Image (cartoon, rainbow, N blue to C red):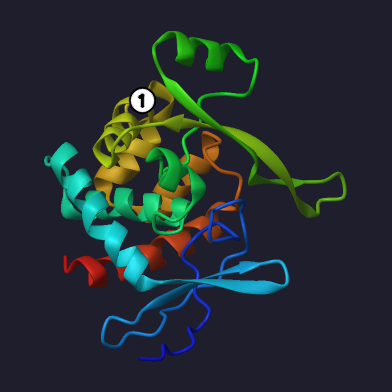
């Protein structure tokens, strides 16, 4: 059966199927018929489309990991964590997710930094990727710019391990108190703002909020929750 062309959808902060960078966001719901969903992500000069069949393959596995590791959380809080990972990883298709089970794009520190050395000393594993991400910043004229940066992604052996690391080593951190409070309250805008304030991402928080909310709506349909 020939698949219908997908409407442009956003649902990732990545601009390529492998997840090699932060792209502009386009929100919307793709084709929904007989399991033929599609999510599009914009790359310079072309559109890369990932069928929802791929997303559906990742979604139940990761949703199961969230529920198994964090059964005490509300459904909304679990959806926020799921949506966060789905948005960061392009529904499990970004390189850090496909190579090392890291859909949150959590890093181990810059090359040569004390943070990275300490992480490795504690037994942590790292997968380095050149030109892995986009960093947004405002120049001297007040204009938003972006540049490519390399990343040392934290490396895991399962989705459950990545969920546990995200909860124990990020959400539970003392400087993440507002992040945790917003998560437990089910407050998506506050969650995005709090993550931005602790420098988890550099995308404007309003854009992150819109995208995360859209991802969560689609996740509810895909997961039936």
Viewer can see residue 70: no
Q: Residue at the spot x=49%, y=60% of the render? A: 12
What residue is pinned by disc 1? 169
Q: Which quadrant is the C terminus positioned in?
A: bottom left
Residue 3, placed above or below residue 194: below
Q: Residue at the spot x=41%, y=87% of the render? A: 3
Quarter of the view holding residue 83: bottom left
Residue 135, placed above or below residue 126: below
> How would you rate the neighbour count of disc 1 (Cα within 10 Å): few for under 14, some for 14-19, many for 20 or more?
few
Residue 6 in percent (x, y) is at 48, 83
Between 76 and 193, the one lying in front of the other is 76
Q: Residue at the spot x=31%, y=48% of the render? A: 81
Residue 97, placed above or below residue 49: above
Between 210 and 159, the one lying in front of the other is 159
Q: Residue at the spot x=31%, y=38% of the render? A: 181
Q: Is residue 121 left or right of residue 34?
A: right
Viewer can see residue 179: yes
Which element is circle 1 on?
A: helix
The total of numbered circles placed on residues is 1
Between 68 and 130, the one lying in front of the other is 130
Q: Which quadrant is the N terminus positioned in?
A: bottom left
Q: Is residue 214 left or right of residue 81?
A: right
Residue 60 in percent (x, y) is at 22, 58
Residue 18 in percent (x, y) is at 54, 55
Residue 92 in percent (x, y) is at 39, 54
């Amino acid at each position: 059966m020939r698949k219908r062309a997908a409407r442009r959808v956003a649902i990732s902060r990545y601009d390529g199927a492998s997840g090699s960078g932060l792209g502009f966001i386009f929100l919307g719901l793709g084709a929904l018929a007989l399991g033929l969903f599609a999510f599009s992500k914009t790359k310079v000069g072309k559109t890369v489309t990932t069928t929802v069949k791929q997303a559906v393959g990742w979604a139940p596995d990761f949703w199961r990991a969230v529920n198994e590791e964090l059964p005490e959380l509300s459904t909304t809080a679990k959806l926020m964590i799921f949506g966060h990972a789905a948005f960061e990883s392009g529904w499990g298709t970004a390189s850090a997710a496909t190579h090392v089970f890291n859909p949150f794009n959590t890093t181990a520190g810059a090359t040569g930094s004390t943070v990275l050395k300490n992480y490795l000393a504690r037994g942590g594993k790292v997968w380095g990727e050149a030109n892995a991400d986009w960093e947004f910043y405002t120049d001297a004229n007040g204009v938003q710019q972006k540049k490519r940066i390399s990343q040392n992604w934290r490396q895991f052996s399962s989705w459950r391990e990545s969920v546990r690391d995200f909860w124990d080593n990020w959400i539970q951190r003392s400087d993440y108190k507002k992040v945790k409070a917003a998560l437990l309250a089910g407050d998506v805008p506050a969650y995005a703002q709090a993550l931005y304030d602790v420098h988890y991402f550099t995308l404007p928080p309003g854009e992150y909020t819109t995208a995360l909310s859209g991802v969560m709506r689609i996740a509810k349909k895909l997961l039936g929750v």
